[in-house]
Amino acid sequence: MVKVKIDGRVVEVEPGTTVLEAAEKAGVEIPRLCVVPGLYEGSSCRLCLVKTPTGRLFPSCNYRVYRDEEFLASTPDLWEMRRVNFELLLKFHRIECWACERKSSCSLVQLSKELLVDGIPVCSECPLPPSECLLLKGELCLGMIAQSGCNAECLVSGGECWGCRGPITREDVLERAFARYKELGFDVKDVVSKAEIYWNSAPGFATVKKVAERVAGRG
Amino acid sequence: MTWTLLDRCCEKCTHSLENPCPDYIECRLSGPLCHDDERCRELRRRRLEELRYGEKGAKIKVPMASCTLAMGAEAVYRAVEDSVKKIGLEATVAISGCYGLDFIDPWLELAAKGMPTAIYANVKPSDVPRILEEYFVKRDVGGAFALKEKTGAAKGEDKVPLLSELGFWAKQYKWVSRNCGVVNPESLEEYVASGGYRGLSRAFKLGPEATIEEILKSGLRGRGGAGFPTGMKWRITRQQKATPKYVIANADEGDPGAFMNRLLAESDPFRIIEGLTIAGYAVGANQGYVFVRAEKPLMAKRLQKAVEEARRYGLLGKNILGSGFDFDIEVILSAGAFVCGEETAMIAAIEGKRAWPRQRPPYPAEKGLWGKPTAINNVETLAHAATIMAEGAEKFAAVGTEKTKGTKMFCVTGAVKRVGAYEVPIGTSIRTLVEELAGGPPEGVRVKAVQVGGPSGGCIPASLLDLPLDYETLQSAGAIMGSGGIVVIGDENCMVDVAKFFLTFTSAESCGKCIPCRVGLRVMWSILDKITRGEGTEEDLQVLRQLAETVRSASLCALGGTAPNPVLSTLRYFMDEYLAHIREKRCPALVCRALITYRIDEEKCIACGQCALNCPASAISKTEGGKYRIDESVCVKCGVCYAVCPVKAVYKVSGAG
């Protein structure tokens, strides 16, 4: 057995154990997306990077321990790197949580909450499946353009979203959301005036209005 | 068939492929060793002379390497053959490699007994008859570019300098490239005659452990970029218990502007084969691979030919030189992705998989090709190893710096008068290389920066030209040694545009396996693009820097790990240019198309109408005063008018003004 120290917590593991497995045993949480033990261990997502005390970085999913070693998994710079990295990954993700079945089982949604990354709408937390979306019933819900993180309290208690956590500012997401509103027969102007109630002085509201105008103008 | 040095001299020689003689190599030059016969010695002496002056006492060498071929060496070769026939010269026409001095391509080297060997630079096929006649018939070397030695017998000899006295040669330390341009790259005989395979013979006499010891003593570090001590790599591979082991020569040279590996492999391929054999012997491998770019066909062909020749004479195969060591080499063509130069991606490619790098550790020395211990060395490193084994570690370690011994080949391209590959001791300053060897920038151009280490290197500003070229100094200056490509950037270049150029390359070459490199480089590129269009903000610069740092530290392999270097180094040294683009919407070097305007100076304009004639957008019209003017609302900024104006009346402005 070898001793692995992760963020100050020591665990004893079999030689050849990955740092990620050791961290799980030690109760230290390390985010990751790509590793599926036995199936894919290519260290592609780079979210599980940990640091040695000398500052060298290794993906914890792939680095195996054969002697006593120490790692840091939660330093501010590691989290910052993970955030930037995750944001890059999300950049090319077609965010359309309102049409997605995964909802709370989605690791992108979970990570974006942990890393405070912009772009994931309240729909990701909505308890209703896409087929029962309030919008389909003609109720104007702001879930598609509102920042998630509230656990969709209003929707859970039977109401619609009012966007109290502020707007999403990622233009491509807004763009798809407004197109969806239009498609379902809502007037984009109505959406914006409902949003104005909470967002009138929100920094991102200008972007919302800009995108709304653009989508409305497409006839 | 003529007798060659590689053949047996008489019946007394005991050497055969089935029962090889351990002294075979030494016997070629200073033999015969096993018996004493003046005739056999005479045979060798005569053959050495023949190699030098040809079998008929006169020899014409035409360099045949990619660089000289591109400049028309093949036409020169044909012209030489024709004129030899026409004049009725008794001369041997031979091929050779290239000196790496691209500015003299194509050149001719003429040698005859009693004459100084003369080199003629920039030869055109039409010059050939005259040159041959002057040299061989009139015995006049007056028109030559340089001489290799002086004999005091030829006309005009005092007017022609010796090659070794010329500025770009004198400061070089020809160690690993000593044979480039000198020997016939397709002839094993010439390689042996020049002292080749002495290193392997010596390694066999020393044994594998002492061979590694010798390489360690020399202080040789990997010339592929990272600078890992070669002896150490070999020792770690040797110590692994798993068998079989493999050695690989990394000939997948992909940096734009770097061609030293191609030059070595095309001009002196046997040295690489010998080096790889020594590596195989030292680590205990019986199989070696040469991984070479398919886009460099001549390089691959020469290496393949060298392998076949070495096999034919028992220098590859079973029981090499009676040492009991079996070794063979396979030449593998790379599909040409930049990432294939990364060792783990290369291993995947050789295994027939997609060329994706994998996370290290385990390092290839522990788990490499087919999961077995593998030593991967760069072509130049292997050539160094062969030379060190022949010449001794002390001689190699005599030059260089405290931490890094020996020499390194650098390819200097871009804004210099003498583009070429130069071999200098490590620790030579960038200034010496750029100004003294490469001749500095052409007239009217000032050096603004040098990009050291290829697309993943960094831009070092002209103010730091006195920095010595060694691994550590370059790293702290924000560049890398890389393979040793040096691109000299003149003041007509915009540094933001330069950074964007390199990112265009690296982001396209990213294999896509890990996020930071695949997405990060693309996002960085789009920010740079935004800045060159004059739409950047100061916040963008912060994002750019943060992205660069993340991509650098979080990427899986060295491609992503070094790709942000051009951005980070230009941000560090040329912040003023970035800010000019952002704050003033001005491109100081007048390069970024969105930020410049073309105008015509009516004072200078001679109303020739060339600009209007060539303008693809019909944006130029005649004014009432008879001169020409550009309509800025129609102009597409293609720059044609700027290029065609015979009096340079078209000028560019950027920003307010």
Image (cartoon, rainbow, N blue to C red):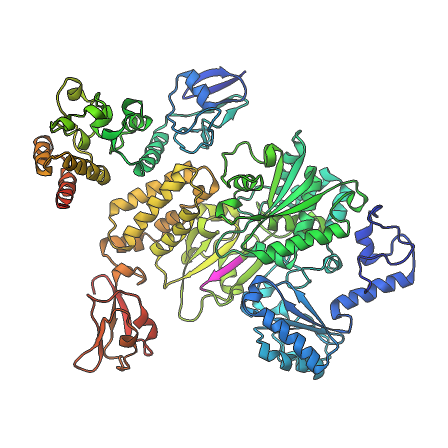
Magenta residue check for B69: no
**B181 relative position to A59: left or right:** right
Q: Quick one: quadrant of the C terminus of chain A?
A: top left
Answer yes or no: is residue A165 visible: yes
- Looking at the image, the residue that sits furthest to the bottom is B138
Q: Quadrant of residue B48?
A: bottom right
Q: Give the total number of marks visible in the rendering.
A: 0
Secondary structure that dominates the magenta span: strand
Question: Horizontal and vertical percent for residue B430?
Answer: 49, 57
**Residues rendered magenta in the picture:** B411-415
Report the front residue among B94 and B550.
Answer: B94
Answer yes or no: is residue B395 visible: no
Above or below for B14 versus A18 = below
> Residue at position x 61%, y 48% from top?
B381
Report the front residue among B346 and B44.
Answer: B346
**B188 relative position to B356: left or right:** right
**B417 relative position to B571: left or right:** right
Q: Quick one: quadrant of the N terminus of chain A?
A: top right
Question: Horizontal and vertical percent for residue B338?
Answer: 49, 48
Question: Horizontal and vertical percent for residue B347?
Answer: 56, 40
Above or below for B607 versus A60 = below
Question: Horizontal and vertical percent for residue B241?
Answer: 67, 29
